[in-house]
Image (cartoon, rainbow, N blue to C red):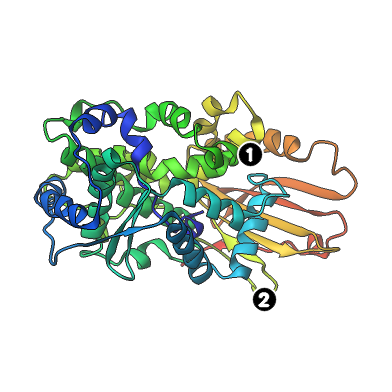
Amino acid sequence: MGGVRIVRILGLVLGGGVGLGGGCRERAEAVQNESQLRQVVQQMVPAVERATGLTFKRPPVVQRRTRAQVRDYVIHKFDSDLPPAELAGAQAAYRMFGLLPDTLDLRATLVDLYTEQVAGYFDPDSATLYVAADVDSPLVRMTVSHELIHALQAQYLDLDSVLQQKRHNDRRSAAQAILEGQATLAQILVMMPEQQTEGLPSFWETRKVFRTQMAQMREYAHAPLWLRETLIFPYLAGADFVRWFDGRHPGHQPFGAAMPVSTEQILHPDRYDGHDNPTVLEFTGSDRAVRYEDDLGEFEIRLLFEQLLGDTAEAQAPLLASGWNGDRYRVLPAEKGQDALVWYSVWNDAATAARFARGLERAWSRRWGAGAAGSRRSRIDRLTIDGSPGVRLVDAPAGWAGWRAIPAIRIAP
């Protein structure tokens, strides 16, 4: 859900899994005040420019922030970037999919989670790099190295316009993976210039290490699977993609027209190279009664299967989500304070659509179990959408008036 991942956490914990942690801590000198912090920034600028192939157009600005000020920033960004109605709609959607518990307050959870995770951040509005004052001195350099790369990125593209596209969740997630992936990869080169990134293992394939590390943090450990996984995805899968891109397109930046447009392209770089762009779906008819509308994309469909199918699903989920070619859903008010979910997806061919539909039937039967029998109704249909193999899920109260005229969809011209 790209719209709520508004604060870029620093990959401090991520560093340990790729050999950054111990060596950098041994070399680091104490950084105890803002004057020393500015010196660290000045020293790192040349290394950051070499690692990214970009040059600072103006010197970066850096300041310290207390943990209370970090929390205030997170709250401010939520309130300004995601108005209450928008956040309520997103929360309703992810509850409908079963990715969030019905009792979880998404805003409060995210504020607590980001406050815990953030060691430093770059604020595009003030063009300032901030470092939390309570970060252990040996980790300050790692914080600076990562956030300096975001400060440099901001001088070449509008970060807010990239990350705050409304109702294009999957595309935002892909863009965030590029920004964080480049920062993660370049951070290694800045901190350990002798390291050859080509020889490192797949970041995404070693994610169990990062899960274990981050599970030691209270808010992360108690967060739902969807939040935990979307938190680490842009750093790890993004780093893998950027490393592949640098090897495939040396001397070029994965920005602008080169920016991937889906998490499918992040997960499968060959599809990026083959210009396998997603099909854009749009609902027909009025949207006046819609509570929320967006898409999931391949990565979040994987998480849907992992969440609903349980312990054995992590191995199954990539196959069930493979062949995705686009999706779109709406959450609509139904009756007695309940919501209806209408979700369409299109697939590369009839075989992948059928495989997804079978997996979704199993997952959705476990989503509600017998508890909602009689009060809700759901149906999964295989259909053709403007010539493309598609699947439609409708889940709503049994007495929902919309059952008589289910919202229709088409491929956008």
The residue positioned 23% from the left and 52% from the top of the image is: 149
Mark 1 falls on what kind of element?
helix
Q: Would you identify the image quadrant in which residue 261 lies?
A: bottom left
User: Closest to the observer: 134 or 263?
Assistant: 134
Q: Distance between the residues labelled 1 and 2?
A: 29 Å
Residue 176's x, y, as percent? 37, 53
Q: In the drawing, what numbered circle is on residue 250?
A: none
Identity, as a three-letter code, of the amino acid under mark 2: Arg
- Residue found at the far front of this picture: 32
Residue 106's x, y, as percent? 61, 54
Categorize mark 2 by other alpha carbons within 10 Å: few (<14), some (14-19), many (20+). Answer: few
Question: What residue sits right under mark 1 in the picture?
Answer: 357
Going from the N terminus, do you reach mark 1 or mark 2 first? 2
User: Closest to the observer: 120 or 95?
Assistant: 120
Locate residue 311 relative to residue 339 in the image: left or right: left
Is any part of residue 323 visible from this angle?
yes
